[in-house]
Amino acid sequence: MKQPTITVTRRGAERARAGHLWIYRSDVADAARADGGAVVGVRDERGRFVGQALYSDRSEICLRLLGWREEEIDREWWRHRLRAAFARRAGVAREADAHRLVYSEGDALPSLIVDKYADVLVLQTLSQGTDAIKPMLVELLVEELNPRAVVERNDVRVRKLEGLEMRAGVIYGDAPAEMEVVQHGLRFAVAPLGGQKTGAFLDQRENHLAAREYARGRALDCFTFNGGFALSVARACDSVVGLDVSAEAVAASRRNAELNGLTNAEFREANVFDALREMQDAGTRFDTIILDPPAFAKNRASVQAAARGYKEINLRALKMLAPGGVLVTCTCSYHMSESMFLGVVAEAAADARRQLQFVEKRIQARDHPVLAGVPETLYLKCLVARAID
């Protein structure tokens, strides 16, 4: 095969051989003959083959490994990888018509995301390498899945690190501005071109079900977004209050409640930190409290500040939780490890003078698989806990 070859340091080669798919620019010894976006061969400083990768001439993640074998990375190679990812979602498709079909590194397809919303696909090409072959990827998606439309949501910050333009729009077919999807029997209105991420948060889907198993009585759902947790637990609870700082999110939650005929769920526009403080001061109590905040730790430097934020909301929630009540608390910050998060919640319980049992430790839904060797693919942590005092 005629392709550029990039030489990496011993450290870079060892990282790849240990299973990670990223090699950083600081571990590239020679990339003089490669163009950004190309598929390149990777060798160590002794000339030994390491793998094949997508090359970026702008990002600090210089190489994204596609595999460790010498093989032709052509159209049929991509088709085979896509088919394999689709096949792994067969069980998910029977439960929800909105789910992730391709989870980038988690599916050994680095920097490529494909989400399915009924008959509309949403595509993200997040590196120079996948962006260079976007037309081919769209063709393959159409050939394999025959969607009504393919939308690109390439309006995310990581593309700037690759020197790529921010783009969002329909690139195949005719996509509606808004559509309805079903997840585990619940109906949700989504806007593929206007919602957060690719139109909705798909990674909490299975945690919604888990929360429903434990929920009871009077429930509070903080950072509700489109009402995913609130609507899931509403059928098990007497009443649910959902809070979000976004007026758009609150309106979406109310509409989704109407779609499902749920009259015991109400949604309020509020800063959650302020609302928790006010409800605590007023002596308000709940039997079930759900905390699903946005990522407080965007990078390693912000972890300590994030820990303080997570502790504050968990502390206030625990002070309002009725005896025997259930707390479902989450972090979607990769830099906040599970052990750190457990420690933060335990500290909050101690400060609240509550005895707390952890009854489940959960992660993101199974259509967002974690690839061994790539810890960055595990980002969502969800704890189910019970106050036993």
Image: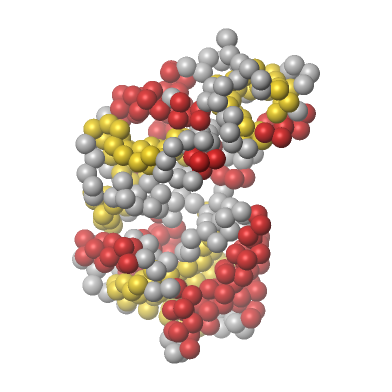
Question: Where residue 144 appears, x then y in whole percent?
Answer: 33, 26
Which of the 4 quarters of the picture holds residue 75? top left
Question: Where residue 355 appears, x then y in whole percent?
Answer: 60, 79
> Quadrant where the C terminus lies?
bottom right
Q: Vertically, is 247 above or below 145?
A: below
Of 345 and 161, the residue lying toward us: 161
Which of the 4 quarters of the picture holds residue 208? bottom left
Q: Residue at x 47, y 17 (%)?
A: 74
Name of the residue lying farthest toward the bottom: 282
Q: Residue at x 31, y 63 (%)?
A: 248
Of 128 and 216, the residue lying toward us: 128
Q: How is the image coloured?
A: secondary structure
* Total numbered labels: 0
Q: Residue at x 57, y 48 (%)?
A: 378
Question: Where residue 17 appears, x then y in whole percent?
Answer: 70, 30
Q: Is residue 372 visible?
A: no
> Taking 333 as reference, is 97 left or right?
left
Question: Where residue 201 appears, x then y in whole percent?
Answer: 40, 53
> Taking 137 as reference, is 10 left or right?
right
Q: Is residue 132 visible?
A: yes
Q: Residue at x 66, y 57 (%)?
A: 301
> Quadrant where the N terminus lies?
top right
